[in-house]
Image (cartoon, rainbow, N blue to C red):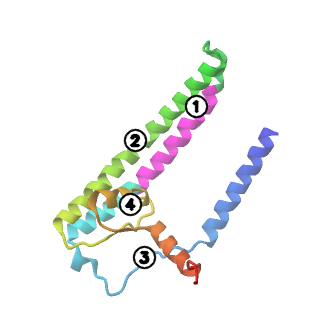
Amino acid sequence: MRLATLTVLAAVWAAAAYFLWTTTRVPDGLHLSGLPEGRFFGAGSIHRAEHYESFFYWLVLGQTVATVVAFALYAWRGARFTRESAAGPIGTGMMLAMLGFGLAWLVTVPFEVLKNEVLDTAERMLKADPSIGAIVCECTNITPYSHEINRRLGVPVFDMVTLVHWFHRALRPQRFPQD
């Protein structure tokens, strides 16, 4: 029964991945006419942004692989810990939970590094140009830090979540009571 369930879940996941891959159209080589980035940013800034983007791709890939490997090892060895533990069922459960939290923390350390980098970059950006009135986080991987950027720097932050909320509110406007 367990193998059949895993097989069905794997097949559903594979089908979803296939349909997402074949039906999603992402603009390649997107060019925004009327916005020459060289006019607003120096060559060094543009190069660093491109370099950061490629670094971030490998960081996320490494994080995902590390998480899968950590939890696969944990699942593989967890049953052995249960059999060999002399702590009893409650103590063993607590030990396995602590190990699980430890593994989850261990593989998320790069995201803490990323969070600090994002916040430091936003702070440097505002110090360099105090006329900046808002920040747009166009990368969905930076969205989790929008609240912290706003809290720390006091500027409005627009990201994918605020875009979806804005779009949804336009489709389903709030109804106000009529007197």
- Sequence order check: which comes first, mark 2 or mark 1? 1
- Sequence order check: which comes first, mark 4 or mark 1? 1
What x and y, as percent, mark residue 141? 44, 59
Question: Can you identify the residue that label 3 sits on?
Answer: 29
Question: Can you identify the residue that label 4 sits on?
Answer: 146
Q: Residue furthest bottom?
A: 34
The verdict on residue 60 being magenta is yes
- Quarter location, residue 41: bottom left
Distance from the alpha carbon under mark 1 to that under mark 3: 42 Å
What x and y, as percent, mark residue 94? 57, 25
Q: Do callouts 1 and 3 mark residues in contact (Cβ within 8 Å)?
A: no
Question: Can you identify the residue that label 1 sits on?
Answer: 74
Question: Can you identify the residue that label 2 sits on?
Answer: 109
Distance from the alpha carbon under mark 4 to that under mark 3: 27 Å
Could you tell me which secondary element the residue under label 2 belongs to?
Answer: helix
Query: Is residue 77 toward the left or the right of residue 56 in the image?
Result: right
Amino acid type, label 4? Ser
Query: Is residue 158 toward the left or the right of residue 122 in the image?
Result: right
Quadrant where the N terminus lies? top right
Q: Do callouts 3 and 2 mark residues in contact (Cβ within 8 Å)?
A: no
Could you tell me which secondary element the residue under label 1 belongs to?
Answer: helix
Query: Is residue 79 toward the left or the right of residue 32 in the image?
Result: right
79 lies above or below 50: above
Amino acid type, label 1? Tyr
Q: State which mark lies toward you, 1 or 3.
A: 1
Q: State which mark lies toward you, 4 or 3.
A: 4
Q: The magenta stretch spans which residues? A: 57-78
